[in-house]
Image (tube, grey):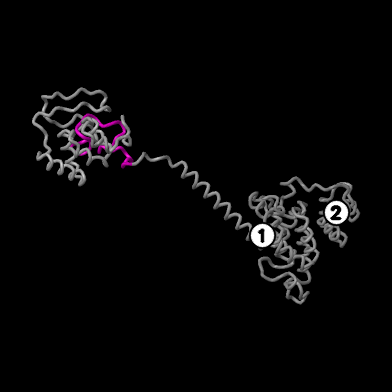
Amino acid sequence: MTQPENYTAAQASDPQTSGQTLADIAAQRPDLRPAVAANPSAYPALLDWLKSLGEPAVDAALASRAQATQVLPAQPAAPVAPPAPSWAGGAPAVPTSAPAATPAYAAAPGYGAPQGMPPQGMPPQGMAPGGITPGYAGTPAKKSNKTLWIVLIIIGVVLLLGGLTVWLIIRAAQKTVDDINDDVSDIVDDITDDPMSFGDDPTLDALYTACGDGDWAACDELYFAAPVDSEYFAYADTCGGAWESETSVLCVDAMAEGDDGASGVTGEGAAEQAYFAALTEACGAQEWAACDELYWQSPSGSTEEAFGRSCGGASDDGYGDCSGLLGGTTYEEPMARGDSRFLDMLWDACAAGDAEACEALWDNSPIDSEYETFAESQQ
């Protein structure tokens, strides 16, 4: 079947153009219908069909034709059926003696007279019932949108990369290299869902230890440098276990008043807080017995209790049995005084006459270590 764009205005106006071709042009090229209507070779049934469309340009051409010939376009009494269109599949021609009738395709679903197709055979495959090729209005067929999508995707990628670049430049302008490294560590922790704990960062470990030894400035520095929700942050927030958590008071200010009551920790309370701080440090160093001791001895609901319950962040199910859950603490041999913060505390308590501390020291000391030997000497 001839493509719509291959028909020309000259062909639509040429009296030598066959009636079938004129019918095809009228069906597939609405813009050439006025020329078809004015063509002397247009047969009456085609003219009647064009008239039924109600298109102003076509009606004007038909009126001019009528004035020129002084004959109104009407269907003859015994019309001669035009040949079947090229796309009608070789259907036989209608007998010349047959009266004008609704074409065969008018009964097919989606077709009706007079709107749709000229009265000649079935419409070409893929043509809309109205006789107009879908998407065609005198222009070439619609092209694929693949190129447009590719362009849009490229633009989107460029915008995304550009936005990310601007964000990185702004962040780099606001932060130092150390701060950026800290942010990277925070991101890694968030991705792995594994909060930082003592032993993960040498710099923070040093501040942690200094804070536990009473260096309040180190506590404050650790607080601002440590990732939120990390063990470092929680420890600094309590000034190494010597102050209440979640307050806005700096450790250097909170602890500056000494023992006059301003710090909230005096006398035996201060010694207890120091004990919990030492247990917290030992627990963070994966001395599981220290975690168990911290859980059982610290106040209910305190930060220390939560830290001991989690085995220093190593487990969510410690609850005072970190040693049993994690297989006990593995010490490097040989062990001597000064190698374990937890065992050092038990040593001091045992030396002060605390029989329970001596027993705990013996239970938790590695075999043949200096700690075990000392514990045995005190029993």
| Label 2 CA crowd tier, 10 Å (few <14, some 14–19, many 20+) | some
Determine the image quadrant of residue 171: bottom right
Determine the image quadrant of residue 79: top left
Element carrying mark 1: helix
> Vertical placement of 172 versus 18: above or below?
below
Q: Which residue is mark 1?
A: 172
Work out whether residue 234 can be spotted: no
Furthest toward the bottom, the residue is 260
Q: Amino acid at mark 1?
A: Ala
Magenta segment, prevailing SS (helix, strand or loop): loop
Q: Decide whether residue 137 is among the magenta residues.
A: yes
Instruction: Locate residue 194, reporting x and y percent.
Output: 67, 51
Q: Which residue is mark 2?
A: 339
Instruction: Locate residue 349, reporting x and y percent.
Output: 84, 60
Residue range corresponding to the magenta coloring: 111-138
Q: Residue at x 75, y 58 (%)?
A: 204
Work out whether residue 123 can be spotted: yes
Label 2 – label 1 distance at C-alpha = 42 Å
> Vertical placement of 337 versus 31: above or below?
below
| Residue 358 or residue 230, whichever sits in front | 230
